[in-house]
Image: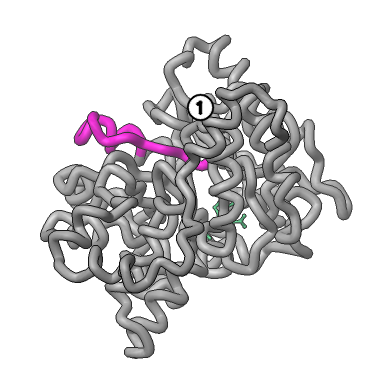
Amino acid sequence: MPEDSPTFLRQTVTAQPTAAVTGAYPQLRLRRNRTHGWTRRLVAETRLGIDDLIWPIFLRDESCVEAEIPSMPGVRRVSLAELSDAVGRAAELGIPAVALFPYVEPDKKTAACDEAVDPENLICRAVRKIKAETPNLGVICDVALDPFNALGHDGIVHGDRILNDETIDILCRQALVQAEAGCDLVAPSDMMDGRIGEIRRRLDVEGYQDVAICAYAAKYASAFYGPFREAIGSGAALKGDKQTYQMNPANSDEALREVALDLDEGADMVMVKPGMPYLDIIRRVKETFAVPTLAYQVSGEYAMIRGAGLQGWIDGDRAMMEALLSFKRAGADGIFTYFAIEAAERLRAG
Ligand code: PBG
């Protein structure tokens, strides 16, 4: 800080808390605050609560195959008949919201993704059921074409291109059928340019001003989505990868541009995804924009913690809680996690 800068500025700067206390031992011993359970609790800087958790649920039709998902032990695809119990438990634990993802039978997948905009699709039926039974539980729907796409991509495929503007049109219609079914928050996870603004406009025109949008703003082309693609059955069909729309893991400034654009276009919340390998992005987004920022602890992160825990290589429960806390420390306001029920049970038990 130059000598001639205004006093208030210099004061503000010198008043910043500083970690630069060197050479203070033996007067200063940081271990003193760690001595007792009560001091550790008292000086804890970050807390994880049930209010921070969002539970992603995979849905299946009654006719569907398997409930089990081999790469996600402990996570099941839930049928509509099983849904009441599942969401009832979430509501009873005080989890604020669930996020829905459909397993779509291969014979219902088309290149035009027709099933995505059918008001009778699995997602819409599930939303109506949840809203009728547990109206105070938040319902979040993914706006993206991949579960419905015969080609596995999040957009309409033309040759080897993923068409941006044609995709947006279908995404708007998809968001509308979800809103009509009673969805509270639509979450576009497709990474097409300009979709937040268009979806906002279309929802408003149709009278859904109160339906909120959570933009998957900084979504990376990640290897950690593998188990999810197995869960929704989109992986087998996928040709190529998603690098022409999802972000390069090398980039961080670009995440801020994505977030800025989505906020300008009307996003109410933004999301960073995956979670743990991108804690630096969560921190930058939160510090730059100070808006509601969510993190998604994705399927591969779940699989690693669960898998190693089941092998006995790590303490799975402690690793789960530590990973969730790390999102809060990085600045996230909420966390999509497949551990939501277990974490909430632990939090409730204290
Ligand atoms: C796709 C979508 C993906 C996830 C959520 N929405 C996968 C992808 O982009 O291929 C991944 C979530 C997870 O891995 O848990 N619209």
Whether residue 300 is visible to the viewer of this picture, yes or no, is yes
Query: Where is mark 1, residue-wise?
Result: 268
Side of 347 where 332 appears, left or right: right
Whether residue 118 is visible to the viewer of this picture, yes or no, is no
The amino acid type found where label 1 is placed reads Asp
Residue 335 drawn at (x, y percent): 41, 50
Kindly identify the residue that appears in the image at 86 percent across and 49 percent down. 161
Of residues 93 and 114, the one nearer the viewer is 93
Side of 286 where 349 appears, left or right: left
Ligand 1, seen in the image, is in the quarter at: bottom right
Colouring of the image? one colour
Kindly identify the residue that appears in the image at 46 percent across and 60 percent down. 21
Residue 41 drawn at (x, y percent): 20, 57
Count of labels in the image:
1
> Which residues, given as a range, are shown in magenta?
127-142
* Residue 10 part of the magenta-drawn span: no
* Quarter of image, res 216: top right
Q: Is residue 312 above or below residue 99?
A: below
* Quarter of image, res 314: bottom left
Side of 217 where 100 appears, left or right: left
Q: Is residue 333 above or below residue 200?
A: below
Q: In which quadrant of the rendered image does the C terminus lie?
A: bottom left
Give the secondary structure at mark 1. Answer: loop
Residue 150 drawn at (x, y percent): 67, 55
Residue 79 drawn at (x, y percent): 32, 54
* Residue 139 part of the magenta-drawn span: yes
